[in-house]
């Protein structure tokens, strides 16, 4: 693959889909991978838009034929990214954005170490719970058990944030969209080897602020709300 591979992950309810949809409007030459899954569509989800919904035997056949870049089983359902998305993007000289979970991120990073990974955090556990309750109402799945399960999964996913290159706190949507755009464009600019313009320097500066190493102190309150201990930071940081 000649382009840049971007990975974005987030707990359910963090607003990742909204961010990705906005990025699609602002950044050209960026292909968005649509994952395959064996679960049934939820709410207004449509075949080929949010996911490729396929039967379990068909998914397992794709596994056997080594058609997946990464895949995982979550809550009894398979999710996976087909290798063909990278091949298609390479032919068009496009970059690729993968919307995958923390298991998928580990698999892809092990194979493609120059991939750029971005983790989206909710502003707090309380806010995430509120968003999940609203989503459950829309999906007509008003189950306390489902909400608690998703919150528990969110905590487990957030524990993996140190594996990512960039951190976004999705508190104010406009700002989060700007930061995500800056990360993608900033990586392109940095890898181009060309002197940046004034506008490009602004992208690079915003991108730098979102680096995981620059976000460690800022996200401590969020980690505390999920009972996730932060890694040790030296006094010199």
Image: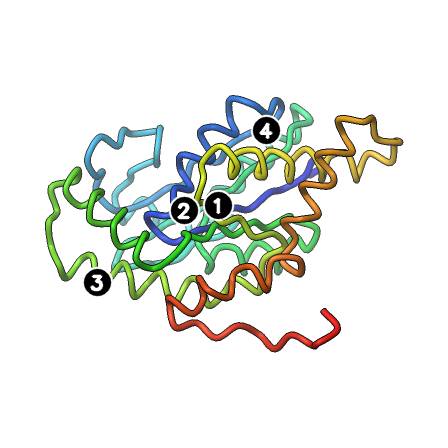
Q: Which mark is residue 30?
A: 4
Sequence-wise, the earlier of marks 3 and 2 is 2
Indicate whether 75 appears above or below 36.
below
Residue that appears at 54% across and 60% down: 106
SS at mark 3 in the image: helix
Residue contact at pointers 3 and 2, CB within 8 angstroms: no
Sort mark 1 into few (<14), some (14-19) or many (20+) by Cα contacts within 10 Å. some
> What residue sits right under mark 1 in the picture?
67
Sequence-wise, the earlier of marks 1 and 4 is 4
Colour setting: rainbow
Residue contact at pointers 1 and 2, CB within 8 angstroms: yes
Q: Is residue 94 left or right of residue 64?
A: right
Give the Cα separation between the discs numbered 1 and 3.
Answer: 34 Å
Q: Is residue 161 left or right of residue 112?
A: left
Give the Cα separation between the discs numbered 1 and 2.
Answer: 5 Å
> What residue sits right under mark 2 in the picture?
62
Please state the horizontal and vertical placement of residue 183, each as a whole percent of the image. Answer: 64, 40
Sort mark 3 into few (<14), some (14-19) or many (20+) by Cα contacts within 10 Å. few
SS at mark 2 in the image: helix
> Dividing the image into 4 quarters, which one contains the N terminus?
top right
> Dividing the image into 4 quarters, which one contains the C terminus?
bottom right
Indicate whether 165 appears above or below 224.
above
Give the Cα separation between the discs numbered 4 and 3.
Answer: 35 Å
Quadrant of res 190: top right
Give the Cα separation between the discs numbered 2 and 4.
Answer: 25 Å
Residue placed most toward the observer, 178 or 160: 178
């Amino acid at each position: 693959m000649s382009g840049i591979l971007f990975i974005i992950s987030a707990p359910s309810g963090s607003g990742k889909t909204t961010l990705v949809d906005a990025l699609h409007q602002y950044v050209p030459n960026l292909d968005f991978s649509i994952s395959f899954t064996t679960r049934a569509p939820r709410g207004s989800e449509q075949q080929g838009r949010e996911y490729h919904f396929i039967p379990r035997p068909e998914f397992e056949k794709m596994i056997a034929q080594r058609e997946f870049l990464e895949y995982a089983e979550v809550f009894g359902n398979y999710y996976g990214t087909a290798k063909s998305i990278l091949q298609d993007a390479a032919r068009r000289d496009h970059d690729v954005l993968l919307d995958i979970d923390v298991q998928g991120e580990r698999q892809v990073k092990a194979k493609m170490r120059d991939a750029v990974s971005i983790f989206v955090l909710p502003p707090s556990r309380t806010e995430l719970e509120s968003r999940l309750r609203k989503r459950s109402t829309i999906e007509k799945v008003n189950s306390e058990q489902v909400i608690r399960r998703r919150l528990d999964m969110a905590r487990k996913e957030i524990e993996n944030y140190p594996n990512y290159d960039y951190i976004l706190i999705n508190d104010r949507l406009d700002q989060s969209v700007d930061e995500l755009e800056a990360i993608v464009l900033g990586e392109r600019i940095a890898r181009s080897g060309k002197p940046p313009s004034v506008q490009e320097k602004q992208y690079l500066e915003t991108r730098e602020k979102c680096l995981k190493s620059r976000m460690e102190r800022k996200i401590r309150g969020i980690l505390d709300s999920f009972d996730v201990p932060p890694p040790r930071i030296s006094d010199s940081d």
